[in-house]
């Protein structure tokens, strides 16, 4: 039986809480192996090479799909992996990553079945009575993606067209957010010197397959494993 308590009951009073259980497992099995590297990072500070902007969706785990560890990714997550016009939170993270950490790459990673893009398609950000909620205000930053997908949709390589309207928008949204990034002063300055590169990624959840935006700026090609050397 699940042990419950009144609101605000300390987590220690909930021995079956899955979050605390996960923390206990980390402390027992994972922390000992990570401790030396984390101790080094604590002494020397962080110096990630990439800023990774992606969705807050729980099914997408940046360090897993990029095979990266502590200190390697400076990550920004929000609903719909959006890069709004100057915004205190996202813009501050971009400025810090580019000007202070001097990352060499910024990646925007979208994914299949994105609930934020689904909400945009259904017009949730425009419904009367919802227009003033934090979520619907945030989704308005996806309007440019909605406009773009009507006249210049992105697609997966080898497909005549994405399978449905949601996939079209999820893909096109990545392209739009890269354009939004280019409008940020810090990004614009570093791009002009050749010290910064922008990358578009798309992750298909059902296939566990990552796609990379090609140079034409509208097509995503699958990222293939390195071929093993012949014995």
Image: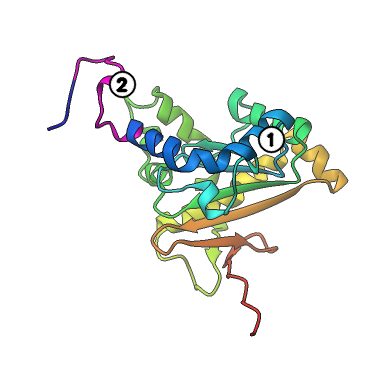
Asked if residue 14 lies in the magenta stretch, the reply is yes
Residue toward you, 215 or 12: 12
Where is residue 161 shown, x and y percent of the image?
48, 68
Q: Which residue is mark 1?
A: 40
Where is residue 192 shown, x and y percent of the image?
85, 44
* Residue at position x 56%, y 41% in the image: 34
Q: Residue furthest bottom?
A: 231
Residues drawn in magenta: 5-19
Tell me, yes or no, if residue 217 can be seen here. yes
Q: CA distance from mark 1 to mark 2?
A: 30 Å
Please tell me the numbered disc located at residue 97: none
Where is residue 198 shown, x and y percent of the image?
70, 50
Q: Residue furthest right?
A: 193
Residue toward you, 177 or 56: 56
Choose top left, top right, bottom left or bottom right for residue 215. Answer: bottom right
* Residue at position x 42%, y 57% in the image: 205
Q: Quadrant of the N terminus?
A: top left
Q: Which residue is mark 2?
A: 12
Q: Is residue 31 left or right of residue 92?
A: left
Could you tell me how many numbered marks the image carries? 2
Choose top left, top right, bottom left or bottom right for residue 166. Answer: bottom left
Dot 1: few (<14), some (14–19), or many (≥20) neighbours within 10 Å? Answer: few
The dominant secondary structure in magenta is loop
Q: Is residue 115 left or right of residue 39?
A: left
Q: In the rendered image of this protein, does residue 15 appear above or below residue 113?
A: above
Q: Quadrant of the C terminus?
A: bottom right
* Residue at position x 55%, y 62% in the image: 211
SS class, disc 2 = helix
* Residue at position x 50%, y 38% in the image: 31
Tell me, yes or no, if residue 142 can be seen here. no
Choose top left, top right, bottom left or bottom right for residue 187. Answer: top right
SS class, disc 1 = helix
């Amino acid at each position: 039986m699940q042990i419950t308590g009144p609101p605000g009951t300390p987590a220690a009073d909930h021995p079956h809480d899955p979050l605390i259980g996960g923390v206990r497992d980390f402390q027992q099995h994972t922390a000992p192996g990570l401790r030396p590297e984390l101790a080094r990072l604590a002494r020397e500070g962080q110096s990630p090479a990439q800023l990774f902007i992606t969705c807050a969706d729980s099914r997408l785990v940046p360090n897993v799909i990029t095979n990266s560890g502590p200190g390697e990714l400076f990550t920004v997550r929000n609903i719909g992996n959006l890069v709004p016009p100057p915004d205190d939170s996202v813009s501050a993270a971009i400025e810090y990553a580019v000007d202070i950490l001097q990352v060499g790459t910024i990646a925007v990673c979208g994914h299949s079945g994105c609930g934020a893009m689904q909400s945009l398609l259904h017009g949730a950000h425009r419904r009367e009575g919802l227009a003033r909620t934090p979520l619907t205000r945030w989704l308005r930053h996806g309007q440019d993606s909605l406009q773009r997908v009507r006249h210049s949709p992105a697609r997966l390589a080898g497909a005549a067209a994405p399978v449905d309207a949601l996939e079209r928008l999820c893909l096109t949204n990545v392209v739009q957010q890269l354009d939004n990034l280019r409008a940020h002063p810090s990004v614009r300055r570093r791009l002009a010197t050749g010290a910064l590169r922008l990358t578009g990624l798309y992750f298909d959840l059902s296939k566990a397959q990552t796609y990379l935006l090609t140079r034409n700026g509208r097509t995503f090609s699958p990222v293939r494993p390195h071929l093993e050397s012949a014995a």
